[in-house]
Image (cartoon, rainbow, N blue to C red):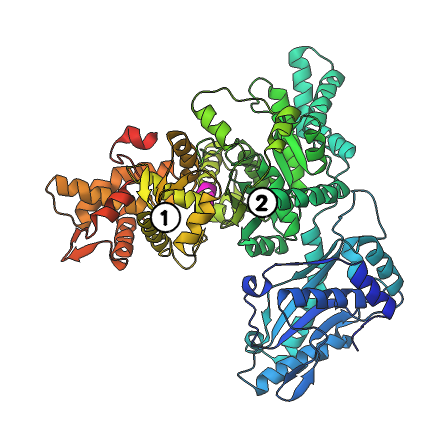
Amino acid sequence: MLAKGSFFSRLINRLWVKSHHVPLETVKELKVDLTRPIIYVVEQNNASDLLGLQTSCKKAGLPDPYQPISINGEQISALIYIHSWSLFAPKTPQLQDAPYLARYQQLLDLHQKDKNLEVQLIPVTFYWGRNPGREGKKSWFDLTQQGQVGLFHKSLIVLKNGKDHLVRFNQPISIKKLSLRGEQQQLAHKLAKVAMRYFDFQKRSSIGPKLPNRKQMIESVLAQPYLREVITNTAKAEQLSESQVEAQCRGYLNEISANFSYSSLRLFRLCLKGIWNHIYKGIEVHHAQAVRDVCQSGAEVIYMPCHRSHMDYLLLSYLLFEQGVVPPHVAAGVNLNFFPAGPIFRRSGAFFLRRTFKDSPLYAEVFNAYFAMLFKQGYPIEFFTEGGRSRSGLLLDPKTGLLSTSLKTFIRQPERNVVIVPIYIGYDHIMEVNTYVKEQAGKKKEHESIWQVLGIAKKLGNFGRAFVNFGEPINVKQHFDQTLPGWRSRDVSDVELKQQVTTIARQVMVNINEAAAVNALPLCAAVLLANQARGVDENSFLQQLRWHLQWLSMNAQDSLVTYENGAADKLLQQALAQNKFQLVDNVINCTEQQALVLNYYRNNIVHLFVLPSLIFHTISRLSEQKQAVELTTMVDCAEQAYLQLQKKLFLNDDLPIADVIAATINKLLQLNWLVDNSGQYSVPDHGLSELMKGHLVAPFDKTSVEN
């Protein structure tokens, strides 16, 4: 019988417990089929858990877990649980005695009788608080044991962490697919074994390792054999005592190291939630399920986002926490270590590094030792692959120092599973954009300070929306296996490692661009600046917007690019609300100063339009030279320009250029933007051609592409 709780427990659940579920769009992200039966699998038959599940199911649009389901006239509970409730901690039953074994067998038997039946098992995990605790300390509220506690113990956990309750729905398991494999009794035992281990493993991998004690962490880093050797050699070289050099190293570590505090993170999260609600109309997140899957696999995660704004630090940590994954330790520039921001960031997981290590080789060794220690102990890590914020809107060439340190640490322990997650971050409005324009014009960069923060705070207002798209993850072990055969059984040379670092760094940038979010302002900026004139009739502009949306719709089904698939006039209104250009007397126009700002936003997404632009430029050039406009001549003409664009804009290099050109031509033919006359291509609409050409200025001029 399912636990429904007393009147008192239901009252607490209603008034005290605040449940938050992930994924937010559960049905869509997990591809749940609401037309087929759903059974939830939970760890314990506990009223607090089940009432929270009921609330979350209602929000997510899923069936009520307390309502039994009917299968071929047979009434079956919509819940399977591992442990029943008890006053004290329950003992895990022997597999052969486990009550849920009979439930699995029943489901398998039903599928044997009805070949059209397809029950979906949805495992659900509950987190009453997500504080992993401190290293060296034990707590009665240890999260990894919450599913196996008694009624009294659980009541205390609910009272303590009721405002921090996360309900996590996991990928549905198809009983039908399982029923097609092997003996039914063996399958039931296999399902039961998986269930017994599933929840414990998931909580350990999702909550992450215990947080380090800062002082102990510093002493552990100083005790590393390699760093001890560095200290000894430095003392001899500089004629100092080892204690003096060690004191210097300890000073560096106090400057560098994070002081992660879960309570500070929760407080910071509440403050940020208020800020986001004030300055943003919404934060759109896409492809987060892939990240949750990576975390659930037990992999060690390195987040590598692009860098648009100082808001990136805050936004990403906040979102990862909201998405139910372990918040990372974040590499931040030492320029952000000023009062009061520095201490707040440090307690929220930031560790600080200097812009350059060249003047202090000892600092470099200490930093690398600290970073390697974080990595070895399995803490998620985040660093911005470009090093600093992009002032142009284009992705910058990657800085490979931290990636190199990560890969060196990985090679020493190749059995570990390390996954890199590239992340695209975009905004309707970037608060520093005017500063970027001035810096591009030659103005010296201002140093960050509390006064600069207060100055920005005065301007907080309508920033529109923020967009975070998670790109295709890169499994480091698989990458090494594919590109460096036999690497596990031999030493990897410095040259080979450098090549791997360069290759992976570039792939990260490619994957970021391939997960771009095309929101209203960058799209309108791209369209407006593609016109030779700075003023465009409103109706013409709307048609041009539709053309660009048509091109985006030609992306492959598995593309991670997201775009505003709405009416062109609605997109225009969203962009106009940011006051970056104007509509006057039915004419869309911008000033020269506004054009400089719009260029930043255009550059966020221009890589998505360079291929059709290059094709139209190529056709124009071949026509001017009186050459045949056919595939071979187009490939010959466009090859050098494409290779430059590929390098500059981090375009995918998986396919030969001939295949890329042919695929682009095929898309243009499907849109009727090109006409095929027996292998000779022509342009039916020269207005469209000139517009698309506007995304590239003189692509056959090497200097122009470089700039």
Dot label at residue 86:
none
Looking at this view, name the residue that lies furthest to the front. 585
Residue 510 within the segment the image draws in magenta: yes
| Measured Cα–Cα span from mark 2 to mark 1 | 37 Å
Horizontal arrangement in the rendering, residue 408 relative to residue 133 (left or right) = left
Horizontal arrangement in the rendering, residue 605 relative to residue 228 (left or right) = left
Whether 601 is drawn above or below 234: the answer is below
Looking at this view, name the residue that lies furthest to the left. 626
Q: Which residue is mark 2?
A: 280
Q: Nearer the viewer, residue 453 or 587?
A: 587
Residue at 67 percent of width and 82 percent of height: 106
Q: Position of residue 663 (x, y in %)?
A: 29, 54
Write down the quadrant of residue 83 in the picture. Answer: bottom right
Whether 454 is drawn above or below 415: the answer is above
What span is colored magenta in the figure? 508-513
Residue at 67 percent of width and 44 percent of height: 274
Horizontal arrangement in the rendering, residue 660 relative to residue 103 (left or right) = left
Q: Which residue is mark 1?
A: 654
Q: Are marks 2 and 1 in contact (CB under 8 Å)?
A: no
Q: Nearer the viewer, residue 294 or 484?
A: 294
Q: Position of residue 280 (x, y in %)?
A: 58, 45
Q: Name the dominant secondary structure of the magenta segment.
A: helix
Q: Nearer the viewer, residue 34 or 297?
A: 34
For the C terminus, the image quarter is: top left
Q: Position of residue 594 (x, y in %)?
A: 41, 33
Residue at 84 percent of width and 66 percent of height: 9
- SS at mark 1 in the image: loop
Q: Position of residue 60 (x, y in %)?
A: 63, 65
- SS at mark 2 in the image: loop
Q: Is residue 148 visible?
A: no
For the N terminus, the image quarter is: bottom right
